[in-house]
Amino acid sequence: MENQGKFLIVKEKADREIVYNQPAGHWEKNETLIEATIRETLEETAYQFIPQGIVGIYQWTVPGTLKTYLRTCLYGYTSNHFPEQALDDGIIGAQWMSRQELADNPQSLRSPMVLKCIDDYLAGKRYPLSILNSLD
């Protein structure tokens, strides 16, 4: 989610460190990817997210481990903000940050996927939501 050159970023505690990440989370049973994205964004940022399309799909393995992440990066816009809403455990807060602010502190990013998603978005990579298909 980009607004006037800034991106909605989550400040969170992960593995005993404070890091920055895009809203992300786990997919729940009987939920589409789009529904999961909307729910997770609301739970982690208190912003209602309206997806418009997909930037890309990213795979990253944490160095020195077997832990691999698969991220689908959606783009869209936010509508309502509910500042009184409690955020998920581990989430310190949400803030709007520029790409440069994030790039200035790469050690504070949860993963290299954070900047890669932003760079691909800024490069104009866009795919329609219609490439997602649920057979449930």
Image (tube, rainbow, N blue to C red):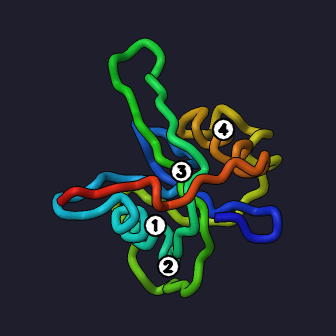
**Residue indicated by mark 3:** 73
Asked if residue 38 is positioned above or below residue 56 in the image, the reply reads: below
Amino acid type at circle 1 is Thr
On the picture, is 127 further left or further right than 124?
left
Q: Mark 1 points at which residue?
A: 41
Lower sequence index among marks 2 and 4? 2
Residue drawn where x is 47% and y is 30% of the image: 59
- Determine whether label 1 and label 3 are within 8 Å by CB: no
Q: Are marks 2 and 1 in contact (CB under 8 Å)?
A: yes
Tell me which amino acid carries mark 2: Gln
Q: Give above or below for 85 relative to 39.
A: below
Callout 4 touching callout 1 (CB < 8 Å): no
Mark pair 3, 4: CA separation: 10 Å
Confirm whether residue 118 shows in the render: yes
Give, as a three-letter code, the residue at label 4.
Lys
Residue 116 got which mark? 4
123 with respect to 129 (left or right): right
Does dot 4 land on a helix, a strand or a loop? helix
Q: Position of residue 53 (x, y in %)?
A: 57, 61
Q: Residue at x 37, y 70 (%)?
A: 39
Using the rendered view, name the quadrant where residue 88 is placed: bottom left
Q: Do the residues labelled 3 and 4 touch (CB within 8 Å)?
A: no
The residue to which callout 2 is attached is 48
Q: How crowded is mark 3: few (under 14 residues within 10 Å), some or many (20 or more)?
A: many
Q: Picture coordinates of residue 128 (x, y %)? A: 55, 59
Amino acid on which disc 3 is placed: Cys
Rendered-image quadrant of the N terminus: bottom right
In this rendering, would 112 be left or right of 88?
right
Among the two numbered marks 2 and 3 on one chain, the one whose residue lies closer to the N terminus: 2
